Amino acid sequence: MDTGAILENAVYNKLSTEGYDIRIGMLQRSKDIDFIAEKDGERKYIQVAVNVYDEATSDREFGNLESIGDNYEKLVVTLLDSTPNTQNGIKMLSLRDFLNMP
């Protein structure tokens, strides 16, 4: 069972049901953005990870978003059930919290 793929499907389904135009982004060969979601002239960049305990995973997920030069919302969604927090303006929240966002 690929937990990461299941998390990505849950995020995609939430965005899709809310009417977002969804694409996958590529900054450079090794830097991808899991989801770029657009609706009503607004944009969200979303990375999805099972967890970000590992420094390399955290650097990849947050670093890819930090590489984006605009000021649209940037999120890292994880399986963790923890208090939402931020890193350099990038919000990290649990899948549960993401799915319950208005």
Image: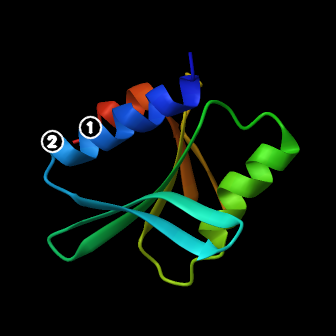
Q: Is residue 1 above or below residue 32?
A: above
For the residues labelled 1 and 2, the Cα–Cα distance comes to: 6 Å
User: Which quarter of the figure has residue 21?
Assistant: bottom left
Q: Position of residue 77 (x, y in %)?
A: 51, 41
Give amino acid for label 1: Asn
Residue at point 26%, 38% (across, down): 14
Does the rendering let one see residue 5?
yes
Residue at point 26%, 37% (across, down): 13
- Residue 67 as seen in the image, left or right of residue 47: right
Q: Residue 5, which numbered label?
A: none
Residue at point 40%, 31% (across, down): 97
Does the rendering let one see residue 82?
no
Looking at this view, is 2 or 63 the one in front? 2
Residue designated by label 1: 13
Q: Residues within 10 Å of mark 2 (few under 14, many from 20)?
A: few
Q: Image quadrant for the N terminus? A: top right
Tell me how the rendering is colored. Answer: rainbow
Tell whether label 2 touches label 1 (CB within 8 Å): yes
Q: Is residue 86 above or below residue 101?
A: below
Q: Secondary structure at mark 1?
A: helix
User: Which quarter of the figure has residue 52?
Assistant: top right
Q: Image quadrant for the C terminus? A: top left
Q: Position of residue 6 (x, y in %)?
A: 45, 26
Residue designated by label 2: 17
Q: Position of residue 37 (x, y in %)?
A: 32, 61
Q: Secondary structure at mark 2?
A: helix
